[in-house]
Image: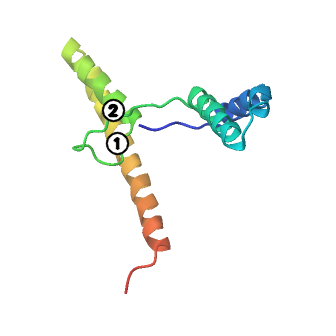
């Protein structure tokens, strides 16, 4: 599970927090109750603005296989089962091209990370 954060949602969350009425927090008696209510209010706004998203991960997939490639594979299988074999083969070429591109990006990213990290001696 993760919470996707985009700039648009971040701005919406900021406006949500600034439009919040904080009188109930300020009117609490002790400092501990103020902090507890403040933290609860912030967490409720955070959970409303950034809902949890569950991502299904197959351990047999390569690390560079993304949702776009999975969707293309699913579409290819659907076309093939419906009898559109020519379209499925055309889509197969596109899938292979996308997979090569994704593998290359993944390899460059990983290589860059390994170059920046210091090896243990």
The residue that appears at 63% across and 38% down in the rendered structure is 36
Quadrant that contains the N terminus: top left
Q: In which quadrant of the rendered view does residue 47 lie?
A: top right
Whether residue 82 sits left or right of residue 67 in the image: it is left
Q: Which residue is under mark 1?
A: 65
Q: Position of residue 14 (x, y in %)?
A: 73, 34
Mark positioned earlier in the residue sequence (2 or 1): 1
At 46% across and 66% down in the image, what residue appears?
A: 113
* Image height of 69 relative to 107, above or below: above
The quadrant holding residue 67 is: top left
In the displayed structure, does residue 44 sit left or right of residue 78? right
Label 2's element? helix
Would residue 113 be visible to someone looking at this image?
A: yes
- Image coordinates for residue 55, horizontal then vertical, percent: 38, 34
Q: Residue furthest bottom?
A: 121
* Cα–Cα span, label 2 and label 1: 7 Å
Kindly identify which residue carries mark 2.
Answer: 70
Q: Quadrant of the C terminus?
A: bottom left
The percent position of residue 99, horizontal first and vertical second, equals 34, 43
25 to 87, vertically: above or below: below
Picture coordinates of residue 120, whole percent (x, y): 38, 82
In the image, taking residue 36 as reference, residue 65 lies left or right, namely left
Q: Are marks 2 and 1 in contact (CB under 8 Å)?
A: yes
Q: Is residue 19 visible?
A: no
Q: Which class describes the residues within 10 Å of circle 1: few (<14), some (14-19), or many (20+)?
A: some
Residue drawn at point x = 22 percent, y = 20 percent: 80
Q: Secondary structure at mark 1?
A: loop
**Left or right, residue 82 beside residue 49:** left
């Amino acid at each position: 599970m993760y919470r996707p954060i985009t700039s648009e949602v971040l701005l919406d969350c900021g406006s949500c927090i600034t439009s919040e009425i904080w009188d109930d927090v300020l009117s609490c008696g002790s400092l501990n109750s103020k902090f507890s209510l403040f933290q609860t209010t912030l967490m409720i706004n955070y959970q409303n603005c950034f809902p949890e998203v569950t991502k299904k991960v197959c351990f047999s997939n390569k690390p560079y296989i993304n949702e776009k490639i999975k969707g293309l594979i699913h579409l290819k299988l659907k076309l093939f089962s419906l009898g559109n074999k020519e379209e499925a083969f055309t889509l197969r070429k596109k899938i292979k091209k996308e997979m090569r591109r994704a593998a290359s990006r993944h390899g460059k990213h990983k290589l860059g990370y390994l170059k920046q990290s210091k090896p243990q001696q």
